[in-house]
Amino acid sequence: MNIQLKINMNDKLFIRDPEQSELGKKIILHSIQLIHKNGFEAFTFKKLALDIGTTEAGIYRYFENKHRLLIYLTAWYWSWLEYQVTFQTNNIKDPAVKLKQVIKLLATTVEDDNSTLYVNESILHQIIITEGTKAYLTKRVSEDNKDHLFKPYKDLCALIGNMILECNPDYTYPKSLASTIIEMAHFQNFFMNNLPSLTDFGQDKNEAEIVKFLEDLVFSSIK
């Protein structure tokens, strides 16, 4: 028996909850595939409608625009990742080992989760790396923040920040370091594969080296 993971989403992210209908689930599934294939700039609801076999108007019944859909996808991913962090560190007592496990989760390839049939987390992870910052690097960020659209990302940072404090309760910048770990993991992965001269990992393209780099960065900071 397959257990289906249900993530509760902020209802201000959508007009109609996509998880409540087959069309809504297809919108999520196919938008992930199209954004990954063509990039967010080239992605349109018209193309999405053609890919699904529905109307553009039908997609607008679920999402106000493509940017709100991108925020939905990123928020979903952060909530899913918070669940993974909690699940995979639940039985680890040593705070340093726990933090290393989190770094590994952030910096290595994500496997698709069979408990979420209409979301391919492996592909969505690649979207987060290449497109994720576009969710909040906008002129509307303050307005979106008032609607708590970025709460899943904040919750993940808070969780990691608390793990940092478990390692060193006197460390002054736990939230700043937590968000730095997340963004650095993605930037280094992107640079490694696309702008290799900006990293020390471009030749071998080995994610394990990114993990080692982040571990060195984190534990040198909090020791």
Image: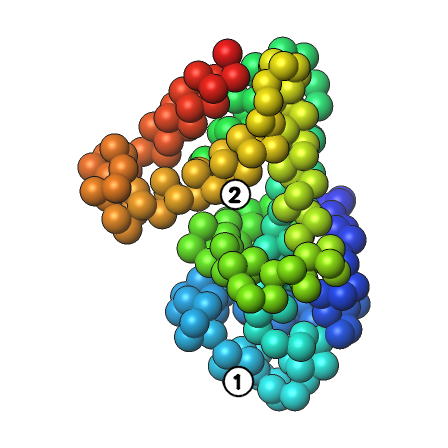
- When the figure is inspected, residue 103 is found, relative to residue 29, above or below; the finding is above
Which amino acid, mark 1? Lys
Amino acid type, label 2 = Glu
* Number of the label disc, if any, that sits on residue 46: 1
Residue at the spot 37% in from the left edge and 26% down from the top edge: 213
Of residues 122 and 185, which is closer to you in this image?
A: 185
Pick the front one: 169 or 72: 169
Q: Dot 1: what SS?
A: helix
Closer to viewer: mark 1 or mark 2: 1
* 18 relative position to 40: left or right: right
Q: Examine the image and state in which quarter residue 157 appears.
A: top right
Of label 1 and label 2, which has the lower sequence position? 1
Looking at this view, is 90 or 5 the one in front? 90
Find disc 2 in the rendering and name its residue. Answer: 111
* x 67%, y 34%: residue: 158
Give the percent coordinates (x, y) of residue 145: 68, 57
Quadrant containing the N terminus in the rendered view: top right
